[in-house]
Image (cartoon, rainbow, N blue to C red):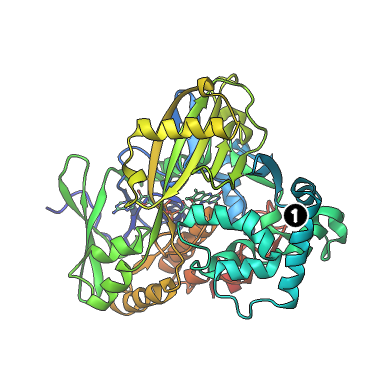
Amino acid sequence: MADPTTPRSRDHVVVMGAGPAGLSAAYELTRHGTPVTVVEKDPRQVGGIARTLEFMGCRFDVGPHRFFSKSPEIEALWTEVLGEQIRPVSRLTRILYQGRFFDYPIRASNAFLNLGPVETARCLLSYAQARVHPVVEPQSFEDWVSNQFGRRLFEIFFKTYTEKVWGIPTSELSADWAGQRIRGLNLVEVIRNAVLPTAWRGGGERAIVKTLVDSFRYPRLGAGQMWESVAARLASAGHPVRLGEEVMAVRHAGGRVLSVAVRDSAGGTLDVLGTEFISTMPIRELIAKLQPAAPSIVRAAADALGYRDFITVNVVVDRAEVFPDQWIYVHDPGVKVGRIANFKNFSAAMVDDSGLTGLGMEYFCFDHDSMWTWSDADLLDLGRRELVALKICRAEDVKAGMVYRQPKAYPVYDGAYLGHVAVVREWLARALPNLWLVGRNGMHHYNNQDHSMMTGILVARNIANGANYDPWLVNTDAEYQEEERAGKAAGEAAGRQVPQRIAS
Ligand SMILES: Cc1cc2nc3c(=O)[nH]c(=O)nc-3n(C[C@H](O)[C@H](O)[C@H](O)COP(=O)(O)OP(=O)(O)OC[C@H]3O[C@@H](n4cnc5c(N)ncnc54)[C@H](O)[C@@H]3O)c2cc1C
């Protein structure tokens, strides 16, 4: 049954999903005076993966979300939304490996001191080998990183954690992920970063590889505060997010999407009509929901896209101080946890009682793994045991905890994903030009919040202004590569235009 309250204006945009991408698109549309309806399947919260959960006076992100962007426009937008509520944080993050803490970003002196002279010699030898005999045209993460750091350092600092995150051998993981995360970084860069003053690193202050960025910003009450605030602004502008409305079908005819059918929390079905449609849903889900169905080749391509799922075991520890880092990467293969975040080190306001500490323990898995269906009690027990095994706290310090399961946290970059995404994109561009894909899973692209936001903003401008930005270039070209040299961009002057080369 059609929703009688749905506006039928000629220019009405329907946004599917109230994560960073969908909310940013909607916010930009309201700036242009374009009516917009945002439907979100979660009945309580906006923010998607960047939401913040509350439990017993402690706040936990779904994996910690630092705010850092090379786009001055995105940084300015964060300031516009949160003002004094978003604050700078000096980064302290380390790797826990075989009972020792290694600085991360890796500092050569600290790493070699911890590894000892014999292991250091092995690392340097294997680095020399990699320089003399690199893998030509590396295709896998393993070959790519071994070329940059040598096989030995790769095994110590990259292999275990990466395999925990992705659940596949690093030899099967595409080099694209390394390129996106750590390009520009190699052993020489690490040593130079460790020993030279900033001004001598070549290129002056601008020459900091993003992986090495040592400060970022963070909202006082967690990442979700940003998205709750954007949603509040949308509500004030007359476009409240429609929570608890899940898109069940995307209906099209005559080469255009006409409506989405949503199921509300009460189980009823509504048709939401529009002229343009923006999807942040995972591509696999979107294609499966098209009515009439997409051609079988397109469905097969979408179905072949993989995702990595994610469990956070969030514990309240009855101690004021546990460790000083914002997060610790856990490289030991003997425990399942991949990373542990300490949220009060992002913002003291993340705990109501300063005598307590909130730790978020990250477990990467697939939704078909048995771990995904473990009871909360079993997962909490695992978390407690692993904290003890890692000597982070005592079992009796863990006062309580809660578990959060995040499906499709990571779009998987296997050897074939680019081809599958291309099939879907090409067909959609021809068959349904008023359906726009944005965001992380929405584009199957390893986008951070800033990238996800920018894709939404550019599409909003295309719709509202008839602009011709290409959101698929965000986080791929020079300006948006994660590993590109960053620095001055963070916190730069407000209101700058998006450089045309991001968007052309
Ligand atoms: C562990 C982890 C750590 C991260 N750390 C950082 C970080 O430090 N800094 C950073 O900038 N980024 C970080 N990110 C990335 C960041 O979370 C994403 O870039 C961002 O959340 C993507 O926004 P999005 O709107 O595209 O998607 P999502 O956040 O996934 O939001 C999509 C929304 O759509 C809704 N939805 C889905 N299907 C439907 C449907 N059928 N109907 C209605 N609604 C639907 C979902 O409920 C969700 O609210 C991290 C991600 C992870 C997993």
Specify the farthest residue to the left. Answer: 1
180 or 139, which lies in front? 139
Q: Count every numbered label the image shows and give the total.
A: 1
Image vertical order of residue 401 relative to residue 460, above or below: above
Kindly tell me whether residue 240 is visible in this rendering.
no
Which residue appears at 61% of the width and 36% of the height? 346
Which residue appears at 55% of the width and 75% of the height? 139
Dot 1 amino acid type: Glu
Image position of 271 (left or right of 88): left
Kindly tell me whether residue 23 is visible in this rendering.
yes
383 or 41, which lies in front? 383
Quadrant holding the C terminus: bottom right
Image position of 57 (left or right of 105): left
Whole-percent x and y of residue 288? 24, 64
Whole-percent x and y of residue 14? 32, 58
Image position of 125 (left or right of 437): right
Specify the farthest residue to the front. Answer: 118
Q: Does the residue labelled 1 lie within 8 Å of ligand 1?
A: no
Rendered image quadrant of residue 489: bottom right
The residue pinned by badge 1 equals 119
Identify the element where label 1 is drawn. helix
Whole-percent x and y of residue 184? 69, 66
Image vertical order of residue 482 relative to residue 138, above or below: above
Which residue appears at 59% of the width and 48% of the height? 331
Image vertical order of residue 162 relative to residue 396, above or below: below
Which residue appears at 55% of the width and 43% of the height? 339
Whole-percent x and y of residue 379? 40, 35
77 or 338, which lies in front? 338
